[in-house]
Amino acid sequence: MLCRSGVYYVGILHASIQTIQQQQTDTMMAKGTLYIISAPSGAGKSSLIQALFKTQPAYDMQVSISHTTREKRPGEVEGEHYYFVSVDEFKQLIKQDAFLEYAEVFGNYYGTSRPRIERVLSQGIDVFLDIDWQGARQIREKMPNSRSIFILPPSKDELARRLQGRGQDSDEIIAKRMDKAVQEISHYAEYNYLIINDDFDLALHDLKAIIRTERLLLERQKQRNEALISKLLAD
């Protein structure tokens, strides 16, 4: 009994030390920033995010992978582009409060995993969400420290040309997306930043500038450089 009791108390002590160490680590580590990026379909937000990640270290930022009930498109990979689930599975996850946000778009459900987002942010990694304005509203209510970016096309004609050039949707679907675009664009003022994607390289530069600016904010710099600041202020 004493041996078991001794092991038991050692186990509690070990667990307590681990908890304290984790709390100290969490205090010292700057949390990542959650970036919400929205745009009408065809404005180029996915291409901008992909181009951004080619120039940034993978350990520094991640794209959130959503759950969806829509059919998998050619070339899409499970767990890389989306987690493809049935409508029944999606509704079960809603009951479990497993989504940070979810919405129905063109008859399909899309949702963002709450546990995964919170875990990645706690590790100091920036997370990027490619979602519509409805999801953005839900996110801002639950995570007010998130930063939001809206991307606009240079014109309606250019938006239609890009949608047709993708070769993924029928003329009927493209017409619906164009009608939906006006409604989506009307919510641009709800966002922190606005990028006009006319010149792709310039739009990418603007996106990088936003991220750099956020990382240079005083509170985040204090968290990331606490040791250095302490040394500089030491007598």
Image (spheres, grey):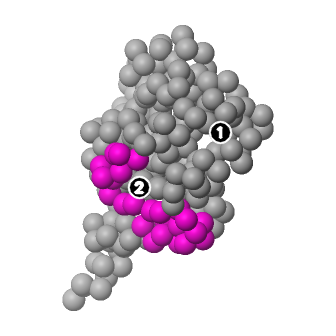
Q: Is residue 134 left or right of residue 202?
A: left
Please give the name of the residue rendered at 21% of the width and 89% of the height, measured from the top-left corner.
Answer: 235
Residue 165 coordinates in the image, percent (x, y):
71, 48
- In the displayed orientation, state which residue is furthest to the front: 157
Residue linked to disc 2: 149
Please give the name of the residue rendered at 47% of the width and 13% of the height, measured from the top-left corner.
Answer: 92
Instruction: Say few, some or many: other residues with alpha carbon within 10 Å of mark 2 (under 14 / 14 to 19 / 20 or more).
Output: many
Q: Which mark is residue 81?
A: 1
Per the model, the C-alpha gap separating discs 1 and 2 is: 21 Å
Q: Nearer the viewer, residue 35 or 227?
A: 35
- In the displayed orientation, state which residue is furthest to the bottom: 235
Q: Secondary structure at mark 2?
A: strand
Asked whether the residues under the numbered discs 1 and 2 touch, taking CB atoms below 8 Å apart as contact, a structural biologist would say no
Let me know if residue 103 is in the magenta part: no
Residue 111 coordinates in the image, percent (x, y):
48, 30
Q: Is residue 219 left or right of residue 37?
A: left
Q: Amino acid at mark 1?
A: His
Please give the name of the residue rendered at 67% of the width and 24% of the height, measured from the top-left corner.
Answer: 71
Let me know if residue 206 is in the magenta part: yes
Residue 64 coordinates in the image, percent (x, y):
53, 43
In the rendered view, tell whether residue 206 sits above or below residue 88. below
Which range is magenta? Answer: 185-210
Q: Nearer the viewer, residue 41 or 83?
A: 41
Residue 196 coordinates in the image, percent (x, y):
47, 63
Q: Quadrant of residue 95?
A: top left
Q: Secondary structure at mark 1?
A: loop
Give the mark nearer the N terminus: 1 vs 2. 1
Q: Quadrant of the N terminus?
A: top left
Please give the name of the residue rendered at 36% of the width and 51% of the height, measured from the top-left corner.
Answer: 188
